[in-house]
Image (cartoon, rainbow, N blue to C red):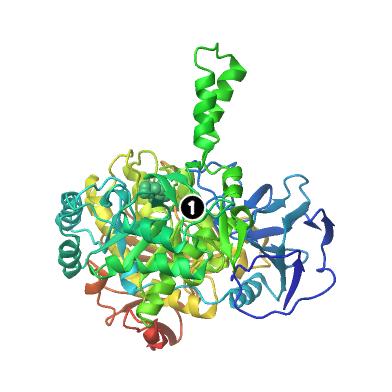
Amino acid sequence: MIRKFRYGKPFPTDAVVKNVGQTSGMPPFFTVTEQDGGVEYRYTMEKEDCVFGLGEQMRGINKRGWHYDGYAYDDPHLTETRTSLYGAHNFIVVFGARTFGVFVDCGKRVSFDIGYTDPDELIITFADADVYFITGESVLAIVKTFRELIGQSYIPPKWAFGFGQSKWGYRCEEDIREVFRGYEEAELPLDMIYLDIDYMEEYCDFTVNRERFPDLKGLAEEFKEKGVRLIPIVDAAVKVKEGYHVYDEGVEKGYFCTDSEGKPYVVGVWPGDSVLPDVLNPEARLWFGSYYEEFLKQGIEGFWNDMNEPAIFYGQGSIDRAFQVVASKAGVNLDHETFNEVQAAFGSLANNPDDYAAMHHKAEGELISHSEVHNLYGDFLTRGAAEYFAERDPDRRYLLFSRSSYIGMHRYGGIWTGDNASWWSHLALNVKMMPSLDMCGFLFAGADLGGHAEDTTEDLMLRWLAFGIFTPLMRNHATCTARDQECYRFKDLGAFRHILSLRYRLLPYLYSEFVKCAQKGEMLFKPLCFEYPEDARARTVEDQLFWGESVMLAPVVEANAAGRYVYLPARMKLLRFTRHGVRERVMEKGEYYIDVPLDEVVVFLREGKVLPLAQPAKNVASLDDRHLTFLKFIVQTTEYTVCRDDGVTKSSLQNFETIKVQP
Ligand code: GLC
C-alpha cells in the first residue's frame, strides 16, 4: 500500500509514473516536525532493525550507522566518509520490528541520518517534497510496490551485456585498433570498445578529431562486422566557442542555463569555459538529444553520458575571485591560516553550491535556481537522448548509461558507479551497491572493473572480473594516469580467458533474469535476508548475494585470500567453474570455508533450481543460446524460462521460451 504526503511546493521530478492521491495527516510511525519550510521525519529504530536502499552510496548494504545525502556530486575520492556520490536515490526500506519503505521525491538535497547522530534514530530532512510511504508483507514486496510506482527499468540491447574495454587515454584510431588486436590475439571475448573524451575536437560534444580519427564511420562499421561496437562518451558541458554549431544553435534558441538575468551561465569543465544545456526545458533536452544523430548515422548505437551532476570545475566569476585571492597573497608570509586561505581559493571552486545557486533553468516560463532541482540534471540530460531515440525509432533499443542519475532515469538508461579506485575495498563496495541500485530500479549498472583511479594488480583484476561477470554492465575502465589494465596485458591469460568466457556462458541466464526482473519490478541482486527474513545470521551477511532465481554469489574481495567463509542459509549445490570443467558438491545449510583459486569462480545453486549454460563465445553476436546445457539441483522435472527476443527491439521482449529440464 502506498500513501503520499506533500510538503511545500515540490518541483515535478517525473520519478513516479502512477497516480497516487495525496493523503492528509501524518505518515505512520514517524514524528514529523515542520520548521522554516524544512521538514524532519524521525523514527526510533529497534536494535535489530536494518535500513536498506539509497542506491548509489558508500558503506554497507545495511545503511545503519552513518549519514547520507541525496545529492549528486562529482568528487573522485570515494572514501568511506563520503555522504553522497554521483546519483541521488532517496528510497529506503526499514526492516525489523516494523517493515516499511520511504521515498522522498525531491530534486534538492535530502539528508538521511541513519543512526549517526543517535544510534537509535532515523532522521530524514528535506524541503519541498512528495513523500511516499510504502507498506507490504516483506522487503521484497515493498520493493516491488515501489518499482511499480516508478515504472519499468530500462532494458538495453542484448549485445550491451557483452564485455567492454575502456580507458581514458585511447587517443586515436591506432590506439583503438591496438586494443582490438590485443583482445583478438589473446583470444579474449570482447563486444565494445569505449571512446573517452580524447576522440573529440577540443572537448566539443558531437565533434570528432579528424586527425586522430580520420574515418570514425569506417572504423565503427569495420569493427561492428567483427562483433565489436564503439561507444563514445558525451559530456554535459558545451564549449563556449563561436562557430561551434552546438554552441551557436543553443545560444540562438535560448537552450542553455542562464544567470538570474537570462544570459548564458558560464562554467568551467573539460573544454574550459562552457555552458550547460537547460535540460529541464523539454525542447532543449530533446534538441541536445537530437545531436546523438551525428553518431547514430555513423553506425554507432551506444553512449555513456558523463559529467552530468553537473560537474563544474568553476562557476562564472568565481574563478576570477580565486585568482584575486591568490594574487593578493603574493609575497605575503604564508602562515598556517594564510596558506589555507590560498589553498581554499582554488580548493573550494569545484561544484560550489553558490555557483549552482547562481545558475538558472527556465521551467514553465519561469527562471528557477539550479539549487532547487540539482539532482535532476543527469536524469533529464540522459532522458533527452532517450526521448530522441524513441522519436527516431520507437521500437529500437540503444545502449545508454549515465554517471549522474535520479530515480526515474532508470526508465531511460543505466548507470556506472563513477570514479572508483583500484582498491580491494572498492571491489567490496561494488558488491554491496548492486542490490541497493536494484531496489531503486537501476538494474543496468556496473562499476569500473579493475578500478578507475590508481594502479591495479593482476590479482585484483581477476577477482574483480570474477564478480563483474555477474553485473549487467561489464566494463573494464581506467583513468589516463593509471597503469594499463586491458586484460591481455596480464600474465596468466588463461585465467582471464576462463573468467571472461564464463560471462558469455552465463549470458543467456543473466539476460533472461535481467529482462524478467525489469518487467516484473524485481531485483536481480538480493541480499540474503531479503529471501530469508527470519534468519538472523543472514541479516549480517554483506558480501554474498542472490543473483537471479537460481544462484547465490560469494565473491572473494580480499587481497591474498586463498578463499573465503561462506554462509549457506539453506541447502545448496556448490558449482566450481575451473578451467577444466565444472565441479559440483551438495552442501547443507551452515558456515564453510571455501577455497577459491584466482582462476576459478565458485557459485551456489539453490535447491530446486537450474542454471542454463551456453558454449563460450567471442562476442554476443556469435553466442549460440539455442543449445543450452543445464546445471541442476533438482529431483523432479522443472522449468526454466529463457528470453527469446531479437536482442534489439522493444516489441520482441515479450518472447519467452519455457524449457523443461529433467533431473
Ligand atoms: C570522468 C569520468 C571518467 C572518465 C573521465 C574522462 O572522470 O567519470 O569515467 O574517464 O571523466 O572523461
Residue 596 visible in the picture: no
Which quadrant holds residue 539? bottom right
Q: Which residue is mark 1?
A: 264
User: Looking at the image, can residue 242 be seen?
Assistant: yes
The image shows residue 64 at horizontal and vertical percentages of 68, 52
Q: Is residue 136 left or right of residue 44?
A: left
- Mark 1 C-beta to ligand 1 under 8 Å: no
Q: Nearer the viewer, residue 303 or 645?
A: 303
Vertical placement of residue 218 versus 423, above or below? below
Q: As shown in the figure, which amino acid type bears the numbered disc 1?
A: Pro
What secondary structure is marked by label 1?
loop
Of the 4 image quadrants, the one containing the N terminus is bottom right
Write the residue at 56% across / 59% down.
361
Q: Position of residue 501 (x, y in %)?
A: 27, 63
Query: Which residue occupies 53% across, 69% down?
Result: 571
Count of marks overlaid on the render: 1
Q: Residues within 10 Å of mark 1 (few under 14, many from 20)?
A: many
Residue 290 in the image: above or below residue 120 = below
Instruction: In this rendered view, identify the residue nearer to me: 104 or 364.
Output: 364
- In which quadrant of the rendered image does the C terminus lie? bottom left
Give above or below for 538 relative to 12.
Answer: above
Side of 543 where 192 appears, left or right: left
Residue 468: image x %, image y %? 39, 58
Q: Residue 452, how many percent across, how many down?
A: 39, 46
Which of the 4 image quarters holds residue 401?
bottom left
